[in-house]
Image (cartoon, grey):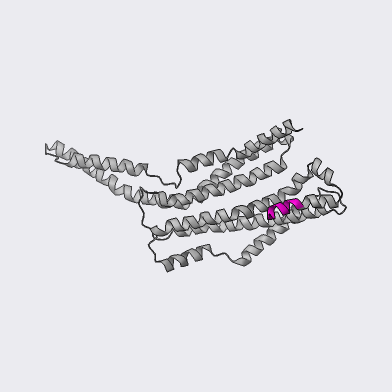
Amino acid sequence: MVCFIVLLIPFVAALLDDNLEQFTRQGQWRIVLFAPSIALYIWIISPFITRAGDNVISSLRPLVDLDDEEFKRQVYTAEYINPRHEILAIIVGGILGAAAISIEFEPAFSWVALYWYITTIMMYAILAWTIFVAIKSTGINAALHRLPMQFDIFNPAPFESVGRQSLLLVLVFVGGVTISVVFTYSPDRLVSPDFWISNLIFVALILLIFFLSMRPTHLLLAAEKKRVLEPVTQRINSGCENLVKMLDDSTDPDGLPAEITALVVYEKRLQAARTWPYNIIILRTLFFSVFIPLLSILARVAVDLLFP
């Protein structure tokens, strides 16, 4: 209901300006609705992002060697954000929004222009606040991974919640870009090199966000894998040296070859253990999400051709 009312206001404003037909026919509505759509999008998806963070904490809790009170204290310390810093981020975003506004409408006062000014400033303020909180929240995972943990390197399932959280961040970014494409698309952009360069940068940025957000988990799993793998490799090397000596001395190696074989199998299993907290489903979703903005462009082209 809130979204419906917010998106309905500019049409009412255009009606008050006695400019509804021009507002709808000349595409001004797309420019005006872009900022509130982004702001509403962030508002709608914020509970899902919060839930993903809570799932990471709950899935890692059984692995942490701390009592409940100490664990809660560590989580609170990692999650705490100074409200003054949040307010400052909102103010900075609002100032940037005011500075970025260009004159898209006639200098004369209109209710549509007023709505556009206010929602654009609000969008920049919300984006600045969201980016600030997202950057600060990356410290939560890093702090959790610094706590004393006991886990099985062959069972990365508890860490897959981190992979799902990283995927959600990517999908949120893809959703924002898709909204931008839908509202700001024009046929001239398809033949512009800047458009395709920016999309390649977008793909690179998606991959960067995906892997950087999982880096603390990767470092933890890689360190544990190395810790377990090194003594196994040393025992294999030592066993092979002893086996060669026994063969040279014509001594019965007894059960040493079987022991070496078992250790080699175990070593291969360790080497195959995953150190990134994602699975095939997450990777497949990531791959197809990259094409969502492109599909939205194709849909817009199809609409333009069918309804010129």
Q: Residue 181 or 305: which is nearer the viewer?
A: 305
Start-end of magenta stretch:
1-8
Residue 163 place in picture, x, y as percent: 48, 48
Residue 182 place in picture, x, y as percent: 69, 41
Which residue is pictured at 50% across the width and 63% down the height? 78
Q: Residue 64 or 200: which is nearer the viewer?
A: 64
In which quadrant will I find the N terminus?
A: bottom right
Residue 114 place in picture, x, y as percent: 80, 55
Residue 102 place in picture, x, y as percent: 79, 50
Chief SS of the magenta region: helix
Residue 275 in sight from this viewpoint: yes
In the picture provided, is 280 more to the left or to the right than 201? left
Residue 116 in sight from this viewpoint: no
Q: Residue 97 or 116: which is nearer the viewer?
A: 116
Which residue is pictured at 64% across the width and 43% down the height? 178
| Magenta-span inclusion, residue 210 | no
Which residue is pictured at 53% across the width and 56% down the height? 51
In the picture provided, is 180 more to the left or to the right than 15? left
Q: Residue 67 or 143: which is nearer the viewer?
A: 67
